[in-house]
């Protein structure tokens, strides 16, 4: 299981990447900052960056709103 | 729109000077004209009143000046239609500089026909800055005229007139053009003429807005921006004012006579560069305006669908930004004040109207902003761009707030679907969600002052009372689904999954408008403020910070709708959301304009806001509100009201019962689960209120303490007396 934003658990699977986690959470916003266990993941690496079982993923949406 | 010579002659023939006041326009110094303008349309008195250092230090300008002037004009028994009620408009000391984006805001205030208490509303356009450069930091309009009037402030001539105005139009898209044609003596002066007006809808409803005009020489049109919230347009029309007009043609880059223009230019250049480099990579405000939010809100279950029942809908794609971009005419940056590189004003052209008094005409309309798209398009379920634009056009020209209109319409549509209303009660209108023609007909009825439109125009709070009394509807159900608090209709965000944003709406001084706090993503998605203390801190900092923009005449969009490229790597968590580099910019701007070297940090700006914010809370107290009971919110903004709503997100809610409430939902009926969730969520809201009150220095009833108002320098005798009377 992968813990996202200390709030959601996403079932882990072999070969899981950051992109898979974002898709599982429905995070479509294009301005986000991702880190895994406190380490930032550059946007260019999201497609391929592996996510391990029990990883803690933080996804910060950058949005100012109204 | 061209106003014919014959028409202008007719208008001029109707003019009679009821009062006249000549003055020597003072030089604006360090952002202040040093005086305010008082106009009484009952007895036709006009006066200039001095602004002293205490007023500047305590209330700063803009919303602060509005509140102070209004406080001194009204008493606790004043109603919105009392002669002593005022419409007050002010820019603020930074307002009108042209070297930084978003510096043309005006802030209007009045006693609201919707809330019966004080309300403020901010708006773009040229009025506030040109009023200041004409010699006045604010204008107060008091009294009720016995005939229609126009109030003219001619800053070029040093002349103020109250003119009898029987021939002018009322609807704003025409009256704004008439004012330009009447008072611009030559084509080059048109940009120097700006007006404030409201339309025929404001005559017949409580949700009238103010339209602030600015002349666009490229398109040859007087465009309109709205101070929408709280019914201030209704107050203006009740005073029989057709337009407040300012003429000032001497605008220069240093009209504010700032203390240090080099400091301002340096800060502005950095910000302009950031917008040019980052906006296309971030929110694309220059391309889409605020409507870029529609898709995001739909994706994240936050878009209000069918009166806030749900947060998304498959048909919402039909109101995404590209559907409106088809109507936008691009010819370069498009701001509502000089020098704004964010340029998020959007101008829709080629809209052929299919209804109403201007049916068949092809018109233009500024916008639509996200709120109008979400309200008319999603909450009312029309999901049609042309309906959104037509509603936007008519709301504007009729002087009706698009937010209150669409939220009130969504409420009656749900009442219709629930059988509380029927065609007999609506005058034959089928008000199922999505009936665009019926929605537009209600809007036209508001302007004509007839039919069911008159009822909707009273706002949700009064409709709830009416429907319970006349139609036997369940008052609790109406309370649960009626999206209003303090009497003001909600703006367009679903807050069920964000406790902090529930507080952002419920605790807002004027009622549920998002300009005090917008914490949904920070809270519900990013989970950056998980504890009550975290949420309370956010509900202290952000409302105070956002208040500051209204004190000085700034738009808040350039603060956080674009960020420095390294903002999220240099800062984290709630600190990043504050955008520290931009906060520093604002300190520089304030010092650069006012010369106040005692202002050194963002905390100094927060302290300014805190004084005004607490003063407004006490102002609510003065008007008979401003305590805990008035911070209550409808349950629809907290959680699912009906079983159908619960079942639509059953997995989410069942999970929360297990994880947050400690209840196993297995074997429970939907109603039992819904009520269990409700008990939990309502208790959470009360705990949140306790935490926020404590953080803000208020007692458990939501009243600022004596110590607090003393520390903030707003310990005026009548303030202290009010608090002592109500302390418990």
Image: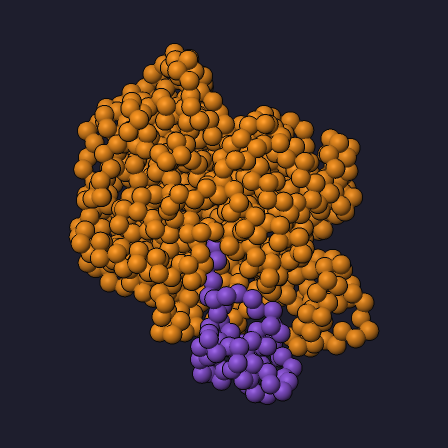
Chain colours: A purple, B orange
Q: Nearer the viewer, residue B714 or B433?
A: B433
Q: Position of residue B420 (x, y in %)?
A: 76, 43
Q: Position of residue B377 (x, y in %)?
A: 61, 47
Residue for point 73% across, 34% down? B429
Q: Quadrant of residue B382?
A: top right
Left or right, B223 with reference to B426? left
Q: Quadrant of residue B151?
A: top left
Q: Position of residue B198 (x, y in %)?
A: 47, 31
Residue for point 53% across, 45% down? B326
Quarter of the rendering occupied by the N terminus of chain B: top left
Q: Nearer the viewer, residue B284 or B234?
A: B284
**In this picture, is B478 found above or below B86?**
below
Left or right, B203 with reference to B60? right
Q: Is residue B380 visible?
A: no
Left or right, B429 with reference to B123? right
Q: Quadrant of residue B193?
A: top left
Left or right, B575 with reference to B488? left
Residue for point 42% across, 29% down? B176
Q: Is residue A45 visible?
A: yes
Residue for point 34% across, 57% down? B276
**In this picture, is B231 found above or below B545?**
above
Q: Position of residue A45 (x, y in %)?
A: 48, 78
Q: Nearer the viewer, residue B573 or A43?
A: A43
Marks counted in the figure total: 0
**In this picture, is A37 found above or below A25?**
below
């Amino acid at each position: 299981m992968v813990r996202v934003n200390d709030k959601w658990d996403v079932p882990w699977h072999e070969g899981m990447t950051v992109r898979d986690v974002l898709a599982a959470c429905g995070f479509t916003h294009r301005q986000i900052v991702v880190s895994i266990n406190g380490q930032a993941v550059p946007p260019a690496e999201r497609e391929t960056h592996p996510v391990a079982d029990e990883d803690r993923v933080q996804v910060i949406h950058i949005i100012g709103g109204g | 729109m061209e106003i014919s010579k014959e028409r202008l002659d007719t208008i001029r023939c109707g003019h009679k000077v009821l009062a006249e006041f000549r003055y020597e326009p003072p030089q604006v110094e360090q952002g202040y004209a040093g005086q305010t303008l008082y106009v009484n349309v009952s007895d036709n008195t006009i006066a200039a009143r001095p602004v002293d250092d205490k007023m500047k230090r305590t209330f700063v300008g803009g919303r602060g000046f509005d509140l102070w002037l209004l406080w001194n004009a009204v008493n606790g028994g004043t109603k919105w239609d009392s002669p002593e009620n005022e419409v007050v408009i002010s820019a603020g000391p930074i307002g009108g500089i042209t070297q930084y984006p978003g510096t043309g805001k005006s802030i209007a205030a009045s006693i609201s026909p919707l809330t019966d208490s004080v309300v403020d509303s901010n708006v773009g356009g040229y009025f506030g800055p040109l009023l200041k450069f004409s010699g006045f930091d604010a204008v107060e309009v008091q009294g009720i005229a016995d005939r229609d009037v126009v109030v003219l402030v001619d800053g070029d001539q040093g002349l103020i007139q109250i003119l009898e105005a029987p021939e002018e139009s009322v609807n704003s898209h025409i009256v704004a053009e008439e004012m330009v044609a009447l008072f611009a003596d030559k084509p080059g002066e048109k940009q120097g003429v700006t007006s404030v007006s409201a339309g025929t809808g404001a005559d017949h409803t409580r949700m009238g807005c103010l339209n602030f005009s600015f002349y666009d020489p490229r398109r040859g049109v007087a465009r309109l921006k709205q101070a929408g919230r709280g019914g201030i347009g209704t107050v203006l029309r009740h005073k029989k004012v057709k337009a407040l007009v300012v003429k000032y043609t001497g605008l220069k880059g240093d009209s504010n006579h700032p203390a240090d223009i080099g400091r301002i230019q340096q800060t502005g250049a950095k910000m302009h560069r950031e917008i040019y480099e980052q906006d296309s990579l971030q929110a694309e405000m220059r391309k889409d305006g605020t409507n870029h939010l529609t898709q995001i809100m739909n994706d994240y279950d936050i878009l209000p669908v069918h009166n806030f029942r749900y947060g998304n809908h498959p048909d919402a794609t039909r109101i995404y930004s590209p559907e409106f971009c088809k109507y936008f005419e691009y010819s370069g940056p498009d701001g509502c004040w000089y020098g704004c590189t964010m340029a998020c004003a959007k101008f829709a052209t080629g809209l052929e109207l299919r209804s109403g008094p201007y049916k068949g005409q092809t018109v233009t309309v500024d916008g639509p902003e996200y709120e109008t798209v979400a309200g008319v398009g999603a909450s009312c379920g029309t999901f049609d761009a042309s309906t959104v634009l037509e509603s936007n056009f008519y709301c504007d020209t009729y002087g009706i707030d698009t937010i209150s209109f669409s939220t009130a319409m969504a409420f009656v549509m749900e009442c219709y679907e629930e059988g509380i209303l029927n065609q007999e009660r609506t005058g034959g209108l089928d008000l199922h969600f999505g009936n665009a023609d019926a929605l537009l007909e209600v809007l036209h009825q508001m302007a004509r002052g007839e039919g069911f439109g008159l009822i909707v125009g009273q706002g949700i709070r009064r409709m709830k009372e009416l429907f319970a009394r006349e139609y036997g509807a369940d008052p609790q159900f109406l309370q649960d689904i009626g999206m209003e608090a303090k009497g003001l209709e909600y703006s367009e965000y679903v807050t069920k999954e964000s406790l902090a944003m529930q507080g952002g709406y419920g605790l807002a001084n004027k009622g549920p408008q998002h300009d005090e706090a917008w914490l949904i993503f920070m809270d519900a998605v990013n989970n950056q403020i998980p504890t009550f203390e975290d949420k309370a801190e956010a509900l202290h900092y952000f409302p105070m910070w956002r208040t500051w923009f209204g004190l000085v005449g700034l738009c808040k969009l350039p603060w956080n709708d674009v960020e420095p490229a390294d903002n999220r790597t240099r800062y984290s968590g709630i600190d990043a959301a504050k955008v520290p580099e931009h906060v520093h910019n604002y300190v520089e701007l304030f010092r650069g304009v006012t010369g106040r070297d005692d202002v050194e940090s963002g905390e100094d700006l927060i302290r300014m806001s805190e004084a005004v914010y607490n003063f407004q809370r006490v102002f609510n107290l003065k008007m008979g509100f401003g305590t805990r009971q008035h911070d209550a919110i409808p349950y629809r903004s907290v959680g699912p009201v009906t079983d159908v709503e619960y079942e639509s997100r059953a997995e989410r809610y069942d999970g929360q019962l297990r994880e947050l409430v400690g209840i196993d939902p297995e074997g429970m009926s939907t109603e039992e689960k819904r009520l269990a969730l409700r008990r939990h969520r309502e208790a959470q809201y009360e705990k949140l209120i306790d935490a926020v009150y404590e953080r803000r220095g208020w007692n458990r009833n939501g009243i600022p303490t004596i110590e607090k108002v003393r520390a903030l320098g707003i310990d005026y005798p009548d303030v202290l007396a009010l608090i002592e009377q109500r302390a418990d």
